Amino acid sequence: MMDSVELLVRILNEAFERKSWHGTNLKGSIRGLTFKHVSWRPQPERHNIWEHVLHCAYWKYTVRRRLTGEKRGSFSLKGSNWFERPVPGCQDQSAWDDSVELLTETHRSLVAVIQSLSPDQLNKPAAGGETSILTLITGIAAHDTYHAGQIQLLKKLMNAKKS
């Protein structure tokens, strides 16, 4: 039987990149996409797939920061929450690939922090607030699943617009 920390890591990994019963996970939702796909917007002022990916990376970073007590402002991109893409200097497949790598590395560093926790820590508040560590971890897994669904919808809309 796995302990509670192992179970949380399993849930987080299923939402991100492991096979799951609920459908496409976050990493699966972006597999094989090109710069053209991820830059497409359904309407002006609406987020594209690329922005969803960076948003997810940012919130994984935020949860990790809350678990470790890191200072704010150490995310590798300037800003917070939503990051407009493409922007000058980030307008090609390589820039998109770098964003996928940022998401993957941020996920892996979050998992490493969670694996270092003891089950006794899960009900304690995370640094900087009253939200429990358990709630942050289950919430970030749900966040990945939610945005995987958003990305799947964006891909369907993109294909419908082409027809």
Image: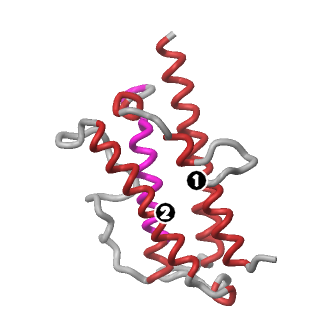
Q: Quadrant of residue 8?
A: bottom right
Q: Which residues are magenta?
A: 43-63
Q: Residue at x 62, y 78 (%)?
A: 132
List the residue tagged with mark 1. 17
Q: Above or below — where is 44 with respect to 77? A: above
Across and down, in percent, residue 18 comes to 63, 54
Q: Earlier in the sequence, mark 2 or mark 1?
A: 1
Question: Would residue 45 be counted in the magenta stretch?
Answer: yes
Measure the alpha-carbon separation of dots 2 and 1.
10 Å
Residue tagged by mark 2? 107
Q: What residue sits 34% from the left and 79% below the top? A: 71
The quadrant of the rendering that contains the N terminus is bottom right
| Amino acid type, label 2 | His
The reply to whether discs 2 and 1 touch (Cβ–Cβ < 8 Å) is yes
Is residue 149 shown above or below 72?
Answer: above
Q: Nearer the viewer, residue 6 or 53?
A: 6
Give the left or right position of residue 20, taking residue 60 as reference: right
